[in-house]
């Protein structure tokens, strides 16, 4: 899934392989994603509007019966994002992504 625009918060659900379509139907009905979900084997990637109240999103996620777990995508990066230098380029890329993820982290916390 491409990076979500700033006004969308990216999440993904894991489901038992073979139940993706049932889980998608439930997700569309209960959570009402803000963009078209992407269905993969054992996973559904989706977004919710960032302005949507956290308690409303959390309540909707708790109603999901088919999904095993729901995860928030807080940060991502390519391991070659950091400039070449003397240190470990992959580790520096991860550190930079983590430092830039404060807003996403703060948005994810109330969903737990």
Image (cartoon, helix red, strand yellow):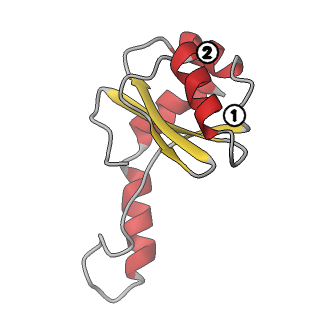
Residue 59: x %, y % from top left: 64, 13
Q: Decide which of tag 1 and tag 2 comes sooner along the chain.
A: 2
Image position, residue 33 (x, y; %): 44, 23
Residue 67: image tag: 1
Do tag 1 and tag 2 residues touch (Cβ < 8 Å)? no
Quadrant housing residue 56: top right
Q: Point out the image quarter for the C terminus.
A: top right
Q: Is residue 67 left or right of residue 40?
A: right
Q: Would you place residue 106 above or below residue 26 in this image?
A: below
Callout 2: SS: helix
The mark closer to the camera, 1 or 2, is 1
Query: Residue at 70% of width from left, 38% of height from top?
Result: 69
Q: Nearer the viewer, residue 68 or 20?
A: 20
Which residue bears the numbered disc 2?
A: 60
The residue nearer to you, when weighing 77 against 14, is 14
Marker disc for residue 104: none
Residue at left offset 68%, top offset 45%: 18
Image point 48% across, 17% down: which residue? Answer: 32
Work out how far the residue at label 1 is from the one at label 2, CA to CA, in angstroms.
12 Å
Q: Residue at x 69, y 34 (%)?
A: 67
Mark 1, other Cα within 10 Å: few <14 / some 14–19 / many ≥20: many
Dot 2 crowding, Cα within 10 Å, few <14, some 14–19, many 20+: some
Numbered-mark total: 2
**Location of residue 38 in the rendering, given as x and y in whole percent from the top left corner:** 44, 41
102 left or right of 68? left
Q: Is residue 46 placed above or below 93 in the rendered structure?
A: above
- Quick one: SS at disc 1? loop
Q: Residue 99: x, y in percent? A: 40, 52
């Amino acid at each position: 899934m491409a990076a979500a625009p700033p006004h969308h918060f990216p999440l993904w659900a894991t489901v038992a392989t073979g139940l993706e379509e049932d889980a998608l139907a439930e997700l569309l009905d209960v959570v009402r994603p803000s963009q078209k979900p992407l269905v993969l084997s054992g996973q559904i990637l989706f977004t919710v509007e960032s302005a949507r109240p956290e308690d409303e999103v959390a309540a909707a996620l708790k109603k999901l019966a088919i999904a095993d777990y729901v995860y928030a995508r807080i940060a991502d990066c390519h391991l070659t994002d950091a400039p070449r230098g003397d240190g470990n380029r992959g580790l520096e890329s991860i550190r930079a992504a983590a430092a830039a993820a404060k807003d996403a982290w703060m948005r994810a916390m109330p969903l737990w």
